[in-house]
Image (cartoon, rainbow, N blue to C red):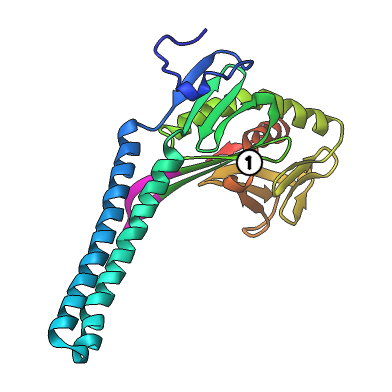
Amino acid sequence: MTPSNLQIPPQFSAVFGIGAPQAVFQPKGAGKWSSLVFGVIFLGGSVLGFLGGSFVTYSNYSKFGPASLQQQLQNVFLPTVLIAGFVFLLGVAALWSAFTNWRKAAVVYQEGLGYSDHKGVRTLRWDQITGMTSAVTKHYRNGIYTGTTHLYTLWDKNGTKLVLNDSLPKVEDLSNHIRQGIFPFLYKAAADSYNAGQRVQFGPVTISKAEGITVQKKSYKWDEVGQVSVEQGFLKISKKGGGWFSGTGAAIAAIPNYEVLLSIINQVVGVKAG
């Protein structure tokens, strides 16, 4: 059942076969228009600045003669070109932002994800997504919190990637919808392989019944593991009876499908939340 208050972007009108839409994530129109307007203003200003600097340089050259040419180039024309060039680049960046974000949107359906940008509309069923990494970074300046950036990368069975970031509003909520959709499929595949005695790899982390857990180049049998914890964005493994430097770890951002990994580890030796 489709929530009654959803407004589906028109580019998704041809999407079918992945259930009813559940949530929409789309940048506000004001942001896209502001980028377009500022881009045009900056480009126009750079052109006018260049023409103005050229006109002043030529006028002074005509008035004071060839002896003043070097001075006019150094004091008028060159600074004008540098400033106009910088403003021109700002304009290009603003127009590119407007172009790339104009059709950007994501729609969560019951059985998959719809995504659109300047390249077109793409759909992914939950069972087609084979990996997802999450990089959530909090930023501080002089000890004062200034904001958080989010970067989520998905890839399908063909290895084609889809990157989601803060250009979409509430992208963290979007990522939670995606996790909820893909978790049953990813967990079943990983659990079946693990129970069959196979190695299951999650980026820098590999687990198996016989060999335990390997992170980077360090391996521990399950009965050697003292504690597995998640602290400050890192997965940490400590060895029973080991010292301060006996353990190992890896950044959560580098571990694809880390929720699946943590779920299996939790069933084997437990996971301590940080």
Identify whether 193 is placed above or below 205. above
Q: Position of residue 113 (x, y in %)?
A: 58, 25
Q: Residue tagged by mark 1?
A: 161
Q: Disc 1 marks which amino acid?
A: Lys
Residue 166 visible from this viewpoint: no
Which residue sits furthest bottom?
Answer: 67
The main secondary structure of the magenta stretch is strand
Q: Is residue 77 left or right of residue 97?
A: left
Rendering quarter of residue 194: top right
Identify whether 169 is placed above or below 83. above
Circle 1 residues within 10 Å: few <14, some 14–19, many ≥20: some
Rendering quarter of residue 124: top right
Identify whether 77 is placed above or below 171. below
Q: Is residue 143 magenta?
A: yes
Which residue sits furthest front?
Answer: 62
Identify whether 73 is placed above or below 48. below
Q: Is residue 136 magenta?
A: no
> Where are the magenta residues, as a range?
139-149
Q: Position of residue 14 (x, y in %)?
A: 56, 19
Q: Is residue 117 left or right of residue 250?
A: left
Rendering quarter of residue 64: bottom left
At 25% from the left and 76% from the top, the residue drawn is 77
At 41% from the left and 45% from the top, the residue drawn is 97
Which residue sits furthest left?
Answer: 63
Q: Secondary structure at mark 1?
A: strand
Q: Position of residue 110 (x, y in %)?
A: 58, 16
Q: Is residue 269 left or right of residue 95?
A: right
Q: Position of residue 33 (x, y in %)?
A: 31, 37
Residue 12 visible from this viewpoint: yes
